[in-house]
Amino acid sequence: MITVSQLNSARPADFASEAENWSQFTTWAGTAKEFVDQEMADVLRERSGETVTAALGRVTVLADNCEYARLQSGLVCAALGGLAEELADAQRRLRSALEEAAERGYPVGEDGSVTFPAIAGEDGEPGWQGGTATGGGGGRLGDYLDSVRALIGGPHAISAQGLAQRIGRALRQAEEVDERYARTLAALVVEPGLRITEAMWADAGEDLRTVGAALTGLLSADDIPAGAPAGENAAWWNALSEREQETYLALFPAAVGALDGLPAVVRDRANRGVLEIEQARVATELEAHRALEPAAGGPAHEEWQRAHDRLEGQSRGMEAIQNRLAAGGTNGLPETFLLGFGTEGNGRAIVAVGNPDLADHTAVYVPGTGARLENVEGDLVRGTRLWRESTMAAMGESVSTVMWLGYDAPQNAMPFEKDEIIPSATDRRYALEGAPALREFTSGLEIAAGGPDAGHTTVIGHSYGSTVVGAAARSDGGLATDDIVAVGSPGMLVPYAKDLGVGSDHVWSMAAGTFDDVVPNAGRMFLGENDVGVGVGRYGIPYLKTDVIPNVPSDEQFGAHIMANDSTGHSAYWDENSLSLRNQSRVIAGRYDDVELG
């Protein structure tokens, strides 16, 4: 049991000071990782040979070590900060009771007991006996019973009992805090050595949960405004102190990394840690799953195979993201930012080439049917090609291109595949459910960049991705963008370009010939929109709208700018050195007069 003297003489400020030291180390580790990635590794990547390859491997290990050190030191910082705050609170409670006891002249024992004097009776009346009150520790019921007994002991007994209970609660609080943080800090001990194994990353995930549980009552994931508009997210983050920001980043990286409206560097820092931990978790699960493979044939093996393929696909997708992040700053590419990541549903991956907060021109590319974490590599390549071509078109102005896999895309475009008689790509539900997330993401980009006039934004939707864009941009939706580009679109849930909220002059469409890309015509009956009904014409005279065939963006009557393209297939619009890619990039760079129309 902690004594009164021990708690009274404790120095919580020392723990707070130590937390500051660890916070500084966290910053150093993050800076060191950036230096290793962008300076040391870049020099090596420009060279070749066995020696260079070996050196690059060692540098990569060093970068991993810096990231691991950043995450773990952040957890130590958070734990020490929590210990200092909670211990100081218990100490304040104790000192307040001690001051009152001193004013009343009640001696206080090391165990928290409070001695009170007798009160002599007057005129032959019986007095009140002196005695010692203790804090008990029997919970609310015990405190209540002690208080009832004190009533028959007189005024001093009542006052002393109240003080003893306050002191006892402070001592028990301090003891619980001491034991909880001792366990927590002991759990943060890591293995020596530079090579960070998958087991160590998996353990880091456990450490996150351990420290988070220890800090219950101080900081909680519930404090983070999940699901709130991007503006509220930014306001919450900006209102935090630097220490609080560091603590939330250390304890709840997944929640912080998912917040639209926060700076790209903050989201990137949070999501990289999440990626490392998830990669280790999936690798561990995959190894354990492989050991349980049942005999071939039969439902049991089929179920095992589905789970195996999912884990293996997630692992492959995460490796592709890691490779893309590592390529940032090489081969003429700028830094890469991981603005979102998760393994829920079909997976989430939001990867920016270049910092969108600082770019003159930002493009958000939304992939379509079949997009998922397992297949993310191809979409990452498209985002990179868009950046290279747009940077040339921008003629000295800065560009950021964002690959936004922030929704569950339909996975089947053909009937009778994947147990679907009607292909999921004909269902509007995916677009309607994904639209709010896209709206908040673009709103967050705008806020983080400094407002709607801070830069020029283009949103590009490919295939079903254009349907998501349409659902998000409909006049009642409000998509934060200057231009919209629909590529190989099966429909945008609106009949005309003017219905997309940016003005028809800023809506662009691109689609290959009917035999090269069947998606626009195949999808129009499901995802296109017609204009049938009663309209109001000149002088208020009603008329009958007879546009019975649903419009898609590549139809002239839709009203978008129809761009020329040389695509020979539904997925060829981002081929290198293609007119299709150049035309998209000219829109991204705001060079509208240079766009070749079809």
Image (cartoon, grey):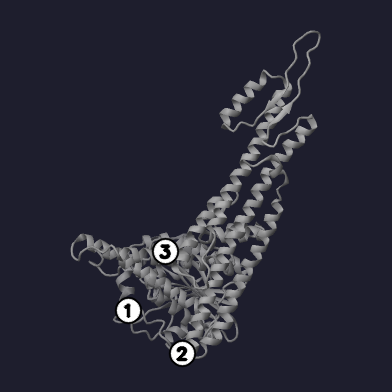
Q: Amino acid at mark 3?
A: Arg
| Mark toward the start of the polypeptide (2 vs 3) | 2
Q: How many marks?
A: 3
Residue, disc 3 = 281
Look at discs 1 and 3 and give the one toward the viewer.
3
Residue at 56%, 63% in the rendered image: 72
Residue 176, given in percent of the width and then of the height, sits at: 59, 44
Look at discs 2 and 1 and give the one toward the viewer.
2
Give the side of residue 396 with respect to residue 519, left or right: right
Residue 288, given in percent of the width and then of the height, sits at: 34, 63
Q: Amino acid at mark 1?
A: Asp
Q: Residues within 10 Å of mark 1 (few under 14, many from 20)?
A: some
Q: Residues within 10 Å of mark 3 (few under 14, many from 20)?
A: some
Q: Image quadrant of residue 241?
A: bottom right
| Mark toward the start of the polypeptide (2 vs 1) | 2
Residue 50, which numbered label? 2
Residue at 27%, 62% in the rendered image: 304
Asked if 533 appears above or below 491 in the picture, the reply is: above
Residue 412, given in percent of the width and then of the height, sits at: 30, 68
Residue at the far left: name it: 297
Look at discs 2 and 3 and give the one toward the viewer.
2
Q: Is residue 46 visible?
A: yes
Q: Is residue 537 visible?
A: no
Residue 343, given in percent of the width and then of the height, sits at: 41, 63
* C-alpha span from label 1 to label 3: 40 Å
> Judging from the image, what secondary structure is the residue with disc 3 in?
helix
| Mark toward the start of the polypeptide (1 vs 3) | 3
Residue, disc 1 = 517
Q: Amino acid at mark 2?
A: Glu
Depth check, front residue: 514 or 231? 231
